[in-house]
Each structure stands twice: as C-alpha cells, then as structure tokens.
Image (spheres, grey):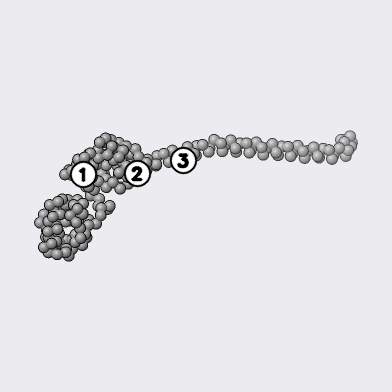
Amino acid sequence: MERIKELWMNYRSQLIGGAIVVLLFLFFVSRSVTSREASTDQKFTTPASTSSISTSSLHTGRVCVDVKGAVKRPGVYRLAGGARVDEALRAAGGPLPTADMRQVNLAKELADQQAIYVPTQGEKVPAELAAESSTAASGSNDNKPIVNLNSASKEQLCQISGIGDKKADLILEYRQQHGQFKSVDELNQVSGFGEKTVAKIKDQLSV
C-alpha cells in the first residue's frame, strides 16, 4: 500500500491528465459516430421524399380525355392540366367540315376522364353523353353570351341554341311591328316560340 501511495503522490498529475485525455478522446469519437449515422439516415430518406413529390406532380399535372364525334382522329388523349377543349380538339386533328362548332365551348377547362363530343350540323348530342360532354348541348349555359332581344342582329340571334335563320327573322319582324320587347317572356308572342322553348333559352337573353 505504501508503494501505491508513493506512486500516486509522485505521478498523480500525469495520471489525472491522462484520464482527461482518454475521456476527451471517447467524447469526440462518440460524437463523430452519431453525426455519421444521422448523415446516413438523411441520405436514404431524402430521395424517397423527392420521389414522392415527383410522383404526386406527375399524377396531378395531366388529364386524360375522350374526344368523340365529328373530329378527324377520335380517341383518348393526355393533355397538360389546365388545358382547354380547343387543345383537345387540335390533338384530335381538329373538327370535320360537318361539325357544328356553335355547340362546342372551346374555352372550357378540361377535367380528368372527361368526354368531349362534337356534334355534326343539325345533330343533337346523344343523351348518354350529354351529362359529361363539354358541348353547349350538355345543358350548361354558363359561358354563353347574353343576347339583347331589342338590339341583337340576325347573326347574334343565331348564336343562341335553338334559333336558326327562320326564327331570327321572326324575332326581327315582331320587333319591327310591335317595338321593343318589354320582357324576355314576351318572346312567347312570336310564332314558333312556346313556353318550353323560351324557358330553355331564357338565361341567354335580356331586354
């Protein structure tokens, strides 16, 4: 014991210093290993996140539409998100000369899995397509212009669904004989315009 005490008294400074050095070494080694493991985890998780974002963008960035009717190349086409009916028709080669483009809303934005039907002149959109088609015959008048019965020309009147040259002439003739329309419902007084016909086109007219 005396020998140990003597050694401790003679070399305690060196022993304490050595212990401190060992502890510092172990501390830095531990930090280095922890940092390396964290870096490895980040390396493996980052590409997965990027891949997930890329896949999500891929699915949401395009729409698939079915173009039917009077077009040169009917079929299914993939277009960029936000594309319009006009772009879908151009992808399908454009409309045929017999297409009735007055019934087609070219500015409507496309939706995924949408059917676009282009009718021929004088054709009514088939009932099974009317609900999902982008044509004016599908019953949506949201994007149609409002025509004033008291100031519209024959060409403007013909833009209304269901009004052709003959009915437009009858409206102009009635206007010349009776003066300006007091209300849209007065259109019932014009030959060829019953209550049901007026009800269908009423939201496209004004006085």
In this image, 34 relative to 173: left or right? right
Please name the amino acid that badge 3 sits on: Ile
Badge 2 is on which residue? 83
**What residue sits 27% from the left and 42% below the top?**
116
Disc 3 versus disc 1: nearer the observer: 1
Please name the amino acid that badge 2 sits on: Ala
Instruction: Determine the secondary structure under disc 3.
Output: helix
Quarter holding the N terminus is top right
Work out whether residue 180 can be spotted: yes
Badge 3 is on which residue? 53
Confirm or deny contact between disc 2 and disc 1 (CB under 8 A).
no
Q: CA distance from mark 3 to mark 1?
A: 43 Å
Give the label on residue 100, or none: 1
Spot occupied by residue 69 in the image (x, y as percentages of width and height): 23, 39
Instruction: Determine the secondary structure under disc 1.
Output: loop
Question: Quick one: label 2 or label 1, which is nearer the N terminus?
Answer: 2
In this image, 165 relative to 45: left or right? left
Disc 2 versus disc 3: nearer the observer: 2
Spot occupied by residue 90 in the image (x, y as percentages of width and height): 30, 40
Q: CA distance from mark 2 to mark 3?
A: 22 Å
